[in-house]
């Protein structure tokens, strides 16, 4: 019981961070595919190119893919969080100050999950982590030869 209350990391903490990033990325990706591809369902038809919903769909589609793969996770998460903050303040907040009433609860939750990924990183199950591991395993002589040019 004391271990659950302590600040010490639990055994699966980093893996759960990766799983959270993947699942939330897949959920977010559906918003983009719905807007831009009409899949799994299109609400209100396809947005006009260069309109705010079109840009939102582009960010959701691209950001969702990058987050699922764990590639460029921190920049993708930061951009997605920023998009969600803009959506909340310009779309939800003017309706009512309370997130439950204005429909912004999910928007806020997504925003803070993406901020978590931005600050905590993508976790060990990601292309970002694989690239870092590969760079750390490169022979020292090869790195010295690259820097000599």
Image (spheres, grey):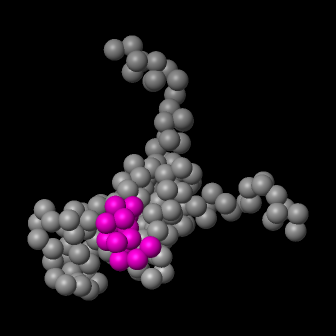
Q: Quadrant of residue 60?
A: bottom left
Q: Residue at x 39, y 13 (%)?
A: 148
The residue positioned farthest toward the right in the image shown: 2
Q: Residue at x 23, y 75 (%)?
A: 35
The residue positioned farthest toward the top in the image shown: 148
Q: In what quadrant of the picture does the C terminus appear?
A: top left
Q: Which residues are magenta?
A: 84-97
Above-or-below relation of 47 to 147:
below
The spot of residue 2 in percent (x, y) is 88, 63
Q: Is residue 29 magenta?
A: no
Report how many numbered discs are placed on residues in the image: 0
Foreground of the two, 72 or 52: 52
Please state if 23 lies on the left or on the right of 89 as rendered. right
Above-or-below relation of 136 to 121:
above
The spot of residue 1 in percent (x, y) is 88, 68
Residue 27 appearing in the image:
no
Foreground of the two, 127 or 36: 36
Above-or-below relation of 130 to 45:
above
Residue 45 appearing in the image:
yes
Q: Residue at x 15, y 65 (%)?
A: 51
Foreground of the two, 51 or 130: 51
The spot of residue 40 in percent (x, y) is 28, 84
Q: Quadrant of residue 34?
A: bottom left
Q: Residue at x 15, y 77 (%)?
A: 46
- The secondary structure making up most of the magenta span is helix
The spot of residue 133 in percent (x, y) is 53, 42
Please state if 122 lies on the left or on the right of 62 as rendered. right
Foreground of the two, 25 or 5: 5
């Amino acid at each position: 019981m004391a271990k659950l209350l302590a600040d010490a990391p639990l055994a699966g903490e980093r893996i759960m961070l990766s799983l959270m990033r993947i699942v939330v990325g897949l959920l977010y990706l559906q918003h983009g595919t719905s807007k831009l591809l009409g899949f799994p369902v299109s609400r209100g038809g396809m947005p006009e190119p260069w309109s705010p919903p079109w840009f939102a769909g582009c960010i959701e589609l691209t950001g969702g893919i990058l987050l699922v793969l764990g590639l460029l996770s921190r920049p993708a998460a930061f951009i997605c969080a920023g998009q969600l903050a803009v959506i909340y303040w310009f779309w939800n907040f003017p309706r009512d100050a309370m997130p439950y009433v204005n429909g912004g609860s999910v928007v806020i939750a997504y925003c803070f999950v993406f901020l978590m990924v931005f600050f905590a990183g993508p976790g060990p199950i990601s292309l970002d982590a694989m690239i870092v591991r590969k760079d750390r395993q490169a022979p020292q002589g090869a790195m010295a030869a690259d820097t000599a040019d």
